Image (cartoon, rainbow, N blue to C red):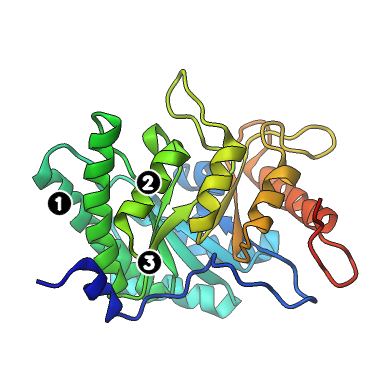
Amino acid sequence: MKTNAQIVAGLSVAPLSGHKTFSPPDTPPFKISLAEWSLHRTLFEGKLNHLDFPKVAKQDYDIDAIELVNQFFMDKARDQTYLADFKQRASDLGVSILLIMCDNEGMLGDPDQSKRRQAVENHYKWAEAAKFFGCHSIRVNAFSTGTYQEQMERVTDSLRRLAEFCAKLSLNVLVENHGGLSSNAEWVVSVVNKVGLPNFGTLPDLGNFKIDDKTEYDRYKGVSEMMPYAKAVSAKSLNFDEQGNETRVDYRRMMKIVLEAGYRGYVGIEYSGDKLSEPEGIRATKRLLEKVERELVQPRGRKRVMN
C-alpha cells in the first residue's frame, strides 16, 4: 500500500494561492475578493438569487473574484446544468470563482468512525464542483468533540483522506478558524503538520477566534501562527467607527502580519455585522482594506513598510 506521501507525489497539486511569492513592483500586495456570506441575509430572505451573485459582486462592488458558500446552492452540487449556468455567468463578467466554503456536511471529527467517513465523502461533491468552477480550494470545518488530543486525531484522519481525494483534482483543502478548537490556532497548526500534505492548509479569519463562551484566542497571535500555511484570508468585519475603522480588529496591524508572512493572494471581504446594511458593510470593509493597503505600501516602488 502506498503511503500518503507517495500518493500525493504522483499527483498534480494546485498551486498554493497564498504561497510566499512577491508581486511585481507595480502591482498591489493583495487583491480583494467577496465572500458570499457577506450577503447571507439577503440570500436567505430570497432577495438575491445565488445565480446572480457574480453580477452583484462585479456591478455593485467592482469586485471580480468571489468565494462561494455551499449553503446557498446546497442541492445543486451535482446539477451540471445549474453549475454550468453559474460558471458561464461568472465567466461572462470576468469574475473568478476562488473557492467554496462547505458547511452542514457532518463533523469531520465525529467520534463515530462511520459518521466521520460519511462526512468526508459528503465533501467529495463540493470538491468536484469546485474543480468544475476552476477554484483553487474548498474550505471545510474542523469540528469535533472530546479531549484536545482526541479531536486532533479524529480531525487529522478525516482531513488527510479528504486532502488525498482533492489532490487528485489539483485542489486544496483549507481549515478556517470557525469556532471550537478550530479557533485555537496552535491546535490548527498541529493538525496541518500532522496531515502533512502540500494541498492542505489554512484560511485565517481575522476576527473569528472565539473558542467558547468563556475563551477567546488572541487574534493577532492566531493569524501570525496560521499565516505560514495560508492559501486564502478572510477579512471579517462587524462594526465600524466614525473613522471607518473596524471596531474589534486593528486592520493595519492584521494586514501587516498578513503581508510580512509573504502572502500575496486574495483577501476576502466577509461582512457579518448588523449595524450597517449588507451593501454598506461590504463597501465599508472594501474602503478600509484599500486605505490600509495605501498606508502599508509606499506609493513609489510599492515596497512594504517595515518597522
Image location (x, y in percent) of residue 69: 43, 54
- Which residue: 46% across, 18% down? 214
- List the single residue furthest toward the right: 300
Q: Nearer the viewer, residue 131 or 1?
A: 1
Q: CA distance from mark 2 to mark 1?
A: 21 Å
Which is closer to the viewer, label 1 or label 3? 3
Q: Label 1: which residue?
A: 117
Q: Label 2: which residue?
A: 190
Image location (x, y in percent) of residue 170: 35, 75
Task: Specify few, some or many for label 1: CA neighbours under 10 Å numbering under 14, 14-19, or 20 or more.
Answer: some
Q: Amino acid at mark 3?
A: Asn
Q: CA distance from mark 2 to mark 3?
A: 16 Å
Q: Is residue 78 visible from the viewing direction of this image?
A: no
Q: Where 260 sits versus 176, above or below? A: below
Q: Is residue 306 visible from the viewing direction of this image?
A: yes
First of labels 2, 1 by sequence position: 1
Specify the quadrant of the image occupied by residue 302.
Answer: bottom right
Task: Specify few, some or many for label 2: CA neighbours under 10 Å numbering under 14, 14-19, or 20 or more.
Answer: few
Q: Amino acid at mark 2?
A: Ser
First of labels 1, 3 by sequence position: 1
Q: Label 3: which residue?
A: 199
Quarter of the figure with the N terminus:
bottom left
Q: Nearer the viewer, residue 136 or 150?
A: 150
Q: Secondary structure at mark 3?
A: loop
37 displayed left or right of 56: left
Q: Nearer the viewer, residue 91 or 263?
A: 263
**Total residue callouts:** 3
Which disc, if any, is residue 184?
A: none
- Which residue: 25% across, 66% down? 164
